[in-house]
Amino acid sequence: MTRGHGKSDLKRQHDMPTVWLMTDPRIATPDLLRAIARLPRGAAIIVRHYHLSGDDRRALFDQMRRVAQRRGAKILLAGDAEMARAWGADGHHGRMPARFRGKPWLHSAPVHDHRELRLAQRAGADVLLISPLFATRSHPGAPSLGVSRFAALARAANVPVIALGGVHPRHAGLVRRLGAAGFAAIDGLVAPRR
């Protein structure tokens, strides 16, 4: 089997999203749905929510997909590519490659260091989410890359990169100067219910 697209096909058929919303169980479902409805057209959403049972995760995914489609946003399921395909996602987020014919497929992968960058590129990822650029509330106490290490990873990538980790829309210019095509956020795109 061959991949459903090549790098040139992805560029020709799809504009790479520059704004990515990462879901997080700390965020109430109504707040996530409102955040998706406010995303710029052509954004992307990565649905994680690993803690939910299969049926509950599917129901949440379907809710988000309906709102995402109205915004012209791509929706990716984190984890298993086969499940993402079966659920009607536009792609998957994870380290494992997906080999599908037909429908264009967007494969994003997490990267925290040079080893993971090489593995993600070898797996054929179309876009890399490099993190954490800054300290982040979702991973308290985790060391951040900072601008120098982030920029070094971005320069070493052979596909577009997205900055994640403590990033807000006000950082859009900075992440572009660091070599990123855009940014991904949780709190930066939706405020959690207190």
Image (cartoon, rainbow, N blue to C red):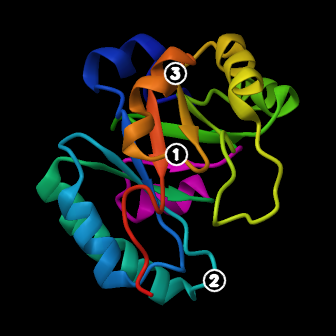
Rendered location of residue 169, percent (x, y)? 37, 43
Q: Position of residue 99 (x, y in %)?
A: 56, 37
Camera-nearest residue between 17 and 104: 17
Name the mark nearer the viewer: 1 or 3.
1
Question: Which residue sits at x=80%, y=23%?
Answer: 118
Give the labeled residue for mark 1: 167
Where are the magenta residues, as a range? Answer: 80-95
Q: Which mark is residue 160?
A: 3
Pointer 1 or 2: first along the chain: 2
Mark 2 vs 3, N-terminal side: 2
Mark 2 neighbour density, 10 Å: few (under 14) some (14–19) many (20 or more): few
Kind of residue at badge 3:
Pro
| Residue at 30% over, 69% down | 64
Cα distance between the residues tagged 1 and 2: 24 Å
Residue 116 is situated, as x and y percent measured from the top left of the image, at 81, 34
Which residue in the structure is indicated by mark 2? 51
Mark 1, secondary structure of its residue:
loop
